[in-house]
Image: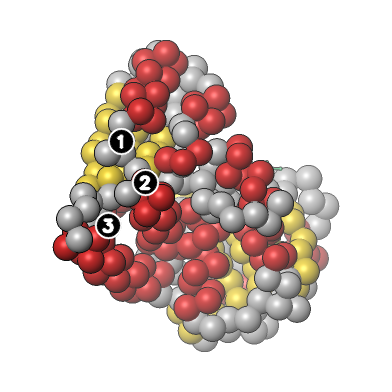
Amino acid sequence: MIILDGFGVANERNKKLNQHILEHIQKGNRRPHLSIILIGENPASLSYVKGKGKACEVAGIDHKLHHLPDDVTFNEVLSLIQSLNKNPNVDGMILQLPIPKHLDENTLIDAISKDKDADGFHVINQGNLYQKKPTIQPATPKGIMTLLAHYNISISGLDAVIVGRSNIVGFPVARLLMDQGATITVCHRQTKDLASHTRKADLLVVASGKPHLVTKDMIKPGAIIIDVGVNRVDGKLVGDVDFEGAKEVASYITPVPRGVGPMTINALLENTYELYLKHI
Ligand code: NAP
């Protein structure tokens, strides 16, 4: 069994990005810039934002945190997004999710210019993805694909099962895996017998947000396991897969933490760099 070291791979890629950025600086260009909008005091979001800032420093990307209070109005957030859209020194921006319920998440995400959409969530960027056109890909699915490619895992012909159908993880990762030749099953809460599907998976991606939803008995021996979940249980971070059991049967597996999380951040930075190249 091989542990897919998302932390190590992401760190290497962030350092490589730094080298590319230095070349642009030497030519007299400015650094790339990522603006992060955070609303409220959600401890998980605060920690993700901190991680994103640290990775920006490794990659040499300027970053600014716009930290807004919980009771900020929709118009206040919208006007911040609009001013960042207009700022020629901002290459990418993200709205850290989740946001408070009184704010309309989809409208705010689509208010971000598609040319500054570092998370790849904008409706046009997602539309391009589904039509197989070049686009800014959503960060977590892109990070997962990069990690699989790093370990030379060939997707073509695999039976891939994805647990979760969200717009930011499950659905787009299904699309990307299908594009690379996997045969896809997408499971969700209405799926009748989850284990009957997961047991058939050569490649199993779990993005349910349910700690230890997938146990050893639900995994086909030799399967590749990508655990996207990040859950805090008794003060400890755990995934959606029972890692200790799963590692006894899997061929490859991502740990939680230090698996998909750092790859998501690396993909966010690579997206920011891609947008920067279009802007300079
Ligand atoms: P989400 O929007 O809540 O979606 C969860 C999906 O899982 C839904 O499609 C849901 O089905 C499905 N699901 C929930 N319980 C299930 C069950 N018992 N059986 C089968 N399907 C079930 O979550 P998300 O944003 O996709 O995130 C998923 C997890 O990944 C969370 O733990 C999140 O924190 C984590 N995450 C991690 C990263 C990272 O970088 N590591 C990035 C993003 C998200 P329905 O559609 O039927 O409701």
Residue positioned most to the front = 27
Q: Amino acid at mark 2?
A: His
Q: Residue at label 3?
A: 55
Q: Could you tell which of marks 2 and 3 lies nearer the N-terminus? A: 3
Q: Residue at label 1?
A: 88
Q: Could you tell which of marks 1 and 3 lies nearer the N-terminus? A: 3
Q: Is residue 156 visible?
A: yes
Judge whether 164 appears above or below 1 on screen: above
Q: Is residue 144 left or right of residue 126?
A: left
For image coordinates 50% across by 55% down, the residue present is: 140
Report which quarter residue 248 is drawn in: bottom right
Label 2 beta carbon less than 8 Å to ligand 1: no
Q: Is residue 182 left or right of residue 245?
A: right
Q: Amino acid at mark 3?
A: Ala
For image coordinates 69% across by 51% down, the residue present is: 130
Of 14 and 239, nearer the camera is 14
For image coordinates 61% across by 45% down, the residue present is: 126
